[in-house]
């Protein structure tokens, strides 16, 4: 599958990230994410997955390099234009990051409210979404009263409610049972089918095999590596080289 | 959309337009339960009382000044009563024919006795005036201000007909009193300014504390695409509600104090104090204090929050 030039949704060029004066946690990242693709980001603990995701959902600026997102230079973009860019990205945080004083309903409704949706317009989609993740009976519950799995489902519902152009999920199935994990993956796939670019960071190798035609970004000590060990990304996606559920050589 | 939903939407829209509500409740609201409304209530009460004091002093000074501005007192200091009376009558005649003099009145002996009664006793009315030579007094009202030049003109006019005359502008006697009132007015203005600064500082600290407490939530809202303006509006509205409630309580408290003190001072029956009562324009000015406090609190909160948010990505 070849991608048309200039159609990329995210482009990293020689990106590096360091916190303070420590050594770089991400080094020389150069890759492109295309619309409608499904990516898994894997790597050992401390490989830099969360740091890379933070760059992807614009929580962090890199120490060096160039990042283009949705056609804009994310490094030099003025602060007041970041919100509009962020509204195009859905994020599932590893620690859920639900707003503790808001109910499950209000947490899920938050991206729509932030985007200016009226109460009448958001009530049905939020209810439907909570119903879909099996929490229709917990709409009024505060996060503290929800189990880890329930919180994760609320976090996922919040990330996808506004139909983002890119979904970034950090270990989204870490706290749910296998059945729910598959169900959530189907949700991500459905979104992907609608054109959303999905990036899922996970430790779960079984998960990688459950999404056909997905691509794998493997991080090793802050650098991207393909299965052959070459430090480059994206792997060349030519006919016959993409393996469903596997990485690309 | 059915009619009920349509009505609901309209009502929600109207409420949102009037109150600014409808922004997501991004930070936990603890209205009226925290110290902020009470801090604002105390600040507003003190400001209103200080301002009322300043206005009353201004009214006193203005009223007294208006009455005494053109006033002159001519004393005929002559020990012999017949000569004193003769000079007094000649002086009044001369004054009445002098340009710029509106009125000239020889103060009767009975009135003089009443004036000195508190010092020389009531029984001495007639006897004291006989025993102690009291200057004859002429109360003069000029058409304009009793300036030094005017006083000198009057002195010159009286020199030939009443050589024992001493002329004083009435306002000059009260100059030290005016100076004291002026100092108190400045003190009131300084107090109002200091309280305003203290209120802004209190709001600034409250906003910073709230920002620190809710930093995680703010970061999440930022990452979901929330703008600085949306976040600032939430804090601004929350502190505005606190300030409005606190301001109202403070104003009522100050009102009670002012009315109580007003009645106490009125009971003194002292002329100067009575002239210091507050007019309707003064009350309107006092009523703007809680409104200004609420606006100041909201502006301070917005400025503080926006400034802090600019440091975040």
Image (tube, rainbow, N blue to C red):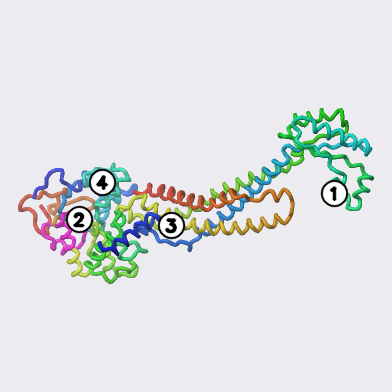
Q: State how far apart marks 2 and 3 are (Cα).
A: 38 Å
Asked if badge 2 and badge 1 are on a common chain, one would say: no
What is the span of residues highlighted in magenta in the rendered image? A186-213
Instruction: Look at the numbered disc 2 and give the secondary structure of its residue.
Output: strand
Q: State how far apart marks 4 and 1 are (Cα).
A: 97 Å
Query: Is residue A116 shown to the viewer in this render?
Result: yes
Near mark 4 (Cα within 10 A), the count class, few <14, some 14-19 or many ≥20, is many
On residue A199, the disc is 2
- Mark 2 in CB contact with mark 3 (< 8 angstroms): no
**Which residue is disc 3 drawn over?**
B238
Instruction: Look at the numbered disc 4 and give the secondary structure of its residue.
Output: strand
Residue that protrudes farthest toward the left in the picture:
A240
Q: Position of residue B124 (x, y in %)?
A: 91, 50
Q: Position of residue B149 (x, y in %)?
A: 75, 29
Q: State how far apart marks 4 and 3 are (Cα).
A: 41 Å
Asked if badge 3 and badge 1 are on a common chain, one would say: yes
Asked if badge 2 and badge 3 are on a common chain, one would say: no
What's the residue at 42%, 54% (across, down)?
A: B235
Closest to the observer, B235 or A58: B235
**Which residue is disc 1 drawn over?**
B114
Asked if badge 4 and badge 1 are on a common chain, one would say: no
Return the disc, 3 or 1, that comes first in the chain's sequence. 1
For mark 4, name the chain.
A
Asked if residue B295 is positioned above or below residue B71 in the image, the reply reads: below
**Which residue is disc 4 drawn over?**
A16
Q: State how far apart marks 2 and 1 are (Cα).
A: 100 Å
Which of the two discs, 4 and 3, sits closer to the camera?
3
For mark 2, name the chain.
A
Closest to the observer, A230 or B183: B183
Asked if residue B188 is positioned above or below residue B167 in the image, the reply reads: below
């Amino acid at each position: 599958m070849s991608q048309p030039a200039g159609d990329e949704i995210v482009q990293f060029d020689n990106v590096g990230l360091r916190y303070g004066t420590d050594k770089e946690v991400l080094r020389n990242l150069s890759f492109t994410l295309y619309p409608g693709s499904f990516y898994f980001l894997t790597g050992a603990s401390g490989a830099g997955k969360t740091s890379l995701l933070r760059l992807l959902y614009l929580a962090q600026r890199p120490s060096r390099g160039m990042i283009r997102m949705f056609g804009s230079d994310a490094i030099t973009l003025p602060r007041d234009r970041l919100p509009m860019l962020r509204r195009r990205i859905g994020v599932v945080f590893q620690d859920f990051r639900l707003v503790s004083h808001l109910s499950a309903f209000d947490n899920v409704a938050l991206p729509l409210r932030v985007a200016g949706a009226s109460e009448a317009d958001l009530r049905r989609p939020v209810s439907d979404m909570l119903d879909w993740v099996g929490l229709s009976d917990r709409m009024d519950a505060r996060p503290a009263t929800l189990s880890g799995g329930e919180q994760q489902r609320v976090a996922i519902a919040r990330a996808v409610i506004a139909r983002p152009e890119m979904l970034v999920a950090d270990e989204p199935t870490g706290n749910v049972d296998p059945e729910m994990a598959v169900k959530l993956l189907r949700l991500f796939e459905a979104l992907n089918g609608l054109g959303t670019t999905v990036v899922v960071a996970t430790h779960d190798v079984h998960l990688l095999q459950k999404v056909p035609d997905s691509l794998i970004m493997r991080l090793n000590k802050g650098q991207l590596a393909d299965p052959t060990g070459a430090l480059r990304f994206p792997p060349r996606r030519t006919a016959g080289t993409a393996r469903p559920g596997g990485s690309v050589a | 959309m059915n009619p009920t939903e349509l009505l609901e939407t309209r009502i929600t829209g109207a409420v949102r337009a009037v109150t600014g509500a409808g922004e997501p409740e991004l930070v936990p609201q603890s209205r009226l339960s925290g110290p902020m409304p009470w801090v604002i209530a105390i600040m507003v009460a003190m400001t209103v009382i200080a301002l009322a004091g300043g206005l009353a002093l201004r009214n006193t000074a203005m009223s007294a000044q208006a009455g005494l501005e053109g006033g002159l007192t001519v004393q005929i200091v002559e020990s012999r009563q017949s000569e004193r009376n003769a000079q007094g009558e000649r002086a009044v005649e001369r004054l009445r024919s002098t340009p710029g003099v509106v009125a000239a009145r020889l103060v009767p002996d009975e009135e003089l006795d009443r004036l000195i009664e508190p010092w020389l006793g009531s029984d001495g009315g007639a006897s004291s005036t006989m025993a102690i030579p009291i200057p004859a007094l002429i109360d003069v009202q000029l058409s304009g201000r009793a300036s030094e030049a005017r006083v000198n003109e009057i002195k010159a006019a009286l020199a030939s007909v009443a050589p024992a005359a001493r002329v004083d502008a009435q306002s000059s006697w009260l100059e030290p009193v005016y100076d004291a009132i002026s100092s108190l007015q400045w003190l009131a203005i300084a107090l109002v300014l200091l309280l305003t600064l203290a209120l802004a500082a209190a709001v600034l600290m409250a906003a910073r504390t709230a920002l620190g407490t809710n930093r995680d939530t703010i970061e999440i809202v930022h990452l979901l695409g929330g703008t600085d303006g949306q976040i600032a509006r939430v804090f601004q509205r929350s502190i505005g509600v606190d300030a409005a409630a606190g301001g109202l309580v403070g104003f009522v408290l100050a009102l009670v104090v002012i009315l109580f003190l007003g009645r106490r001072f009125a009971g003194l029956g002292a002329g100067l104090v009575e002239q210091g009562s507050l007019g309707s324009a003064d009350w309107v000015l006092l009523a703007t204090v809680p409104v200004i406090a609420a606006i100041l609190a909201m502006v301070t909160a917005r400025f503080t929050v926006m400034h802090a948010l600019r440091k975040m990505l």
